[in-house]
Image (tube, grey):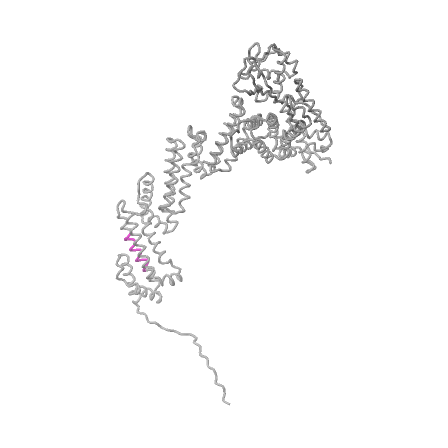
Amino acid sequence: MSNPQKKRNFQIEAFKHKVVVDPKYADKTWKILEHAIHEIYNHNASGLSFEELYRNAYNMVLHKFGEKLYTGLVTTMTAHLKEISKSIEDAQGGLFLEELNRKWNDHNKALQMIRDILMYMDRTFIQSARKTPVHELGLILWRDNVIYSSKIRTRLLDTLLELVLRERTGEVINRGLMRNIIKMLMDLGSSVYQEEFEQPFLEVSAEFYKGESQKFIECCDCGEYLKKAERRLNEEMERVTHYLDAKSEAKITNVVEKEMIANHMLALVHMENSGLVNMLLDDKYEDLGRMYNLFRRVSSGLSTVRDVMTSHIREIGKQLVTDPERLKDPVEFVQRLLDEKDKYDKIISSAFNNDKTFQNALNSSFEYFINLNARSPEFISLFVDDKLRKGLKGVSEEDVEVILDKVMMLFRYLQEKDVFEKYYKQHLAKRLLSGKTVSDDAERSLIVKLKTECGYQFTSKLEGMFTDMKTSQDTMQGFYASHPELGEGPTLTVQVLTTGSWPTQPSVTCNLPAEMSALCEKFRSYYLGTHTGRRLSWQTNMGTADIKATFGKGQKHELNVSTYQMCVLMLFNNSDRLSYKEIEQATEIPASDLKRCLQSLACVKGKNVLRKEPMSKDIGEDDAFFVNDKFTSKFYKVKIGTVVAQKESEPEKQETRQRVEEDRKPQIEAAIVRIMKSRKVLDHNNIITEVTKQLQSRFLANPTEIKKRIESLIERDFLERDNVDRKLYRYLA
């Protein structure tokens, strides 16, 4: 067998290769490249072979002459840029910027060609030697030799600022040229743009607008001033769009805002005869919108507008609710409140961008001044009464809802909602019992709104009143069905009211005519026979009657009168003349009611079915009364109302207030017990706070009354005082 062949391995440890380069190679090659750069700058590049030039630059770098190439480039470009700088310096007047722009464009084109030729150097030598890349180098050299030239630097800034000023004063400038020059500064770096233009531009602008705003504030009214400020702001934003750096917009608008708005805010809003208050009074929506949009741009701007608006609304609201003349007509009083609310709602939606903070300020202002007048709850209820009696006739369902929603808006501002409830119940009772409500749907709609706002407890009695009216209809049908013999003669309609649901009325005695008294007695017997354990008391002061009357010459009318008026008129069937004393004795109607009753029968023109001696507007106890045989009316049916004061008398007000205070006591006690049951131990101040918070949806609890209720609960062993800390209370289970 033959021996296997041995394997041989050869490895190269090192290899040295010598390339012989002509010592003058680098100089020759650079001369070629230097010539090319000169030709490029002199616009003679068309005869150059860029492929050959690239290869020459490539070889120089490859043969380690990168440093020579780079240094030569810097020297050559610097020399050309110095010449260019001299050319720009020599340009006169308006040609200065044009020459600068032209040379900048030439430099950029040259730089692009040079970068293409030296691309290999850019990618290799410059990166390894950590040198500045060719394009960036060209920008730096332009900056240092042209822009930073002592004869160009200041002149350039002054020229640019002068052009801006000329444009601000209405001249037309070459925006394209401005855009190119500004872009040049931006291309040289953000610091160059900021230092060489933006910062001085902002400083000069601040001075300009400081002077202009002072001039405007002295000669313009507020509306005109705001228009000018808005126009200036728009001009500056437009200027940025056309030829400045986009980042400059916030800076220059800040300058305008500070100098034209922030520094003059108070002077503008309080400007005599044209400031914010005058704008509000005159409904200047456009000016108000402009003020809102300008002031929102500066710190505390909107709060300044809001504060002045709030003070104004509170002031006019206070005048409105405390003016004795306005208090004479409750309906007009509430209508003025609604008109004011509509006015400022429209201002806030149209001019103030529906700003929630302004809406909140408006609401707090209304809540403030509405509660300055203790009669606001009563007046709002009277307004509702007027609308639901007659004011909503012929009004569409949608418009009715709008009016009711406005009423609810005022209702929410009331701190004493329980006082409103008291009056509303009284007025609703009168509407239901007299059949004078315009729309049952509107009545029920308002009750639903009140229920949604305040809960079931608030409206349960109101709903009970409607239930009673329906039940009464069924009761009357049953009564007449069981007494068919009553088909002839007077008819009786009785509304049976549940005591707890209706406003408390004093049971007033009144002597009814014999035929009506007998009929009422039959009804009493029927009702008590069908309902056990109930008691009826007649409320004659709340009833009405239709009576047929024949006067002197046989003229006949049907008179719609109150129960009291019926009792008086029926007396004249047996007498031609009756004195006040005789009428009072026969009817036993209370004196105040009787006087109003006789006044409406004898003293109201066109309704005077009685006449009196002596003739006067007031009723005296020595007066005598006769049937007015000469009474005539073009209507067969004549309604004779009772002369009543729409608003409560002082004693009636006191009585209503007293009833409200009495009704509050159990509510305060219930709140205290609920809180203490949950907390077990609580100090006095915290009880006051918690109770006030719990009850604020119905009324503003008086701390003194809360203290009295605490004392009452201690006496009845619901609470006890701590032995050590007398202001600490414990709940007793």
Seen in the picture, residue 175 relative to 124 is either above or below; the reply is above
Q: Magenta segment: does it hold 349?
A: no
Q: Position of residue 396 (x, y in %)?
A: 51, 33
Q: Position of residue 42 (x, y in %)?
A: 26, 57
- Does residue 637 appear left or right of residue 217 in this picture? right
Give whichever of 729, 194 is nearer the camera. 729
Residue at image point 68% right, 20% down? 518
Q: Which residues are magenta?
A: 72-84
User: If the image is split into quadrants, where does the C terminus sit?
Assistant: top right
Q: Quadrant of residue 164?
A: top left
Give whichever of 456, 303 is nearer the camera. 456
Give the prevailing secondary structure in the magenta stretch.
helix
- Does residue 220 appear left or right of residue 605 in this picture? left
Q: How many marks?
A: 0
- Does residue 298 appear left or right of residue 638 in this picture? left
Seen in the picture, residue 637 relative to 712 is either above or below; the reply is above
Give whichever of 643, 286 is nearer the camera. 643
Q: Quadrant of residue 79?
A: bottom left
Q: Position of residue 263 (x, y in %)?
A: 43, 35
Seen in the picture, residue 239 relative to 499 is either above or below; the reply is below
Give whichever of 694, 344 is nearer the camera. 344
Q: Magenta segment: does it hold 82?
A: yes
Q: Quadrant of residue 214?
A: top left
